[in-house]
Image (cartoon, rainbow, N blue to C red):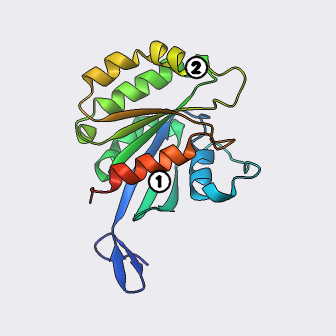
Amino acid sequence: ARAASGGAVMAGAVLPVTTCLLLGATGVGKSLLGKRLRNIRELGEPPATLPTVGTNLTDLTLHRRVTLRELGGCMGPIWPSYYGECGAVMFVIDAANPTQVSSSCVQLLSLLSSEQLAAVPVLILFNKIDLPCYMSLVEMKSLFRMQDIVSCATQPITILEISARDGTGLADVLQWLQATLRDSS
C-alpha cells in the first residue's frame, strides 16, 4: 500500500520513496540492468528480456526505497513528461554498438538541457563491456565529446563502465544511487 505522502507503508512507518529514471535507446540493456540491480547477490544466468514498450518499475531497497522507472527507448519523445518526478537519472549507452552513438548522444544532450533536470544528478553508463567488440571508455568519451558535455552541463555527471550481463560495475551503480539519493527527498 502507498501512503498519501507518496511513501511506502512498512510496519506502520512511512519510508520516503525516491524515483530514478532509467533512460537510453532501445536495446542498450536497461531492463536487464534493472533486474540485475534488484537481485545483485544472485546474478547467475541473465534472465530473458524483451524491448520495453511503456515503462517498467523496479524497487530497490538501499538506505531507503528507490524506484527505478525504466522508460522504453521508443518512448524518447515523451521522456520529458517524467522528468519532474525524479531525484536522479541513469542514462544507458550500448558501448558495443557504434551505429547507435549519434542517436544516444542526441538523447543525452536533450535530457541534459532540460530545465527540469538542471540540478538532477546523472549517471552515464557505458553498458555491454563484456562483449569483445565493445568500445573502450576512452573511445566512447571521445565519440561523445564527453569532456565538452560535462563542462557545459549544469548537473553533476558521473560516468561508469558496466556489464549488466556479467555484473561488472553494478556495485558501483548501487553505491552511486545510495550516495546520490541519500539527501534527496
Q: Nearer the viewer, residue 172 or 93?
A: 172
Q: Is residue 149 left or right of residue 104?
A: left
Examine the image and state in which quarter residue 116 appears: top left
Question: Seen from this angle, which residue lies furthest right?
Answer: 45
Q: Nearer the N terminus, badge 2 or badge 1?
A: 1
Tally the marks: 2
Q: Quadrant of the N terminus?
A: bottom left
The percent coordinates of residue 70 (x first, y second) are: 50, 48
Residue corresponding to mark 1: 68
Q: Is residue 116 left or right of residue 181?
A: left
In space, the residues marked 2 and 1 are separated at their CA atoms by 27 Å
What amino acid is labelled 1 in the image? Leu
Q: Secondary structure at mark 1?
A: strand
Residue corresponding to mark 2: 136
> Would you call the spot at circle 2 few (<14 residues within 10 Å), some (14-19), or many (20 or more)?
some
Q: Secondary structure at mark 2?
A: loop
Number of the front mark, 2 or 1? 2
The percent coordinates of residue 81 (x first, y second) are: 34, 45
What amino acid is labelled 2 in the image? Ser
Q: Nearer the viewer, residue 116 or 140?
A: 140
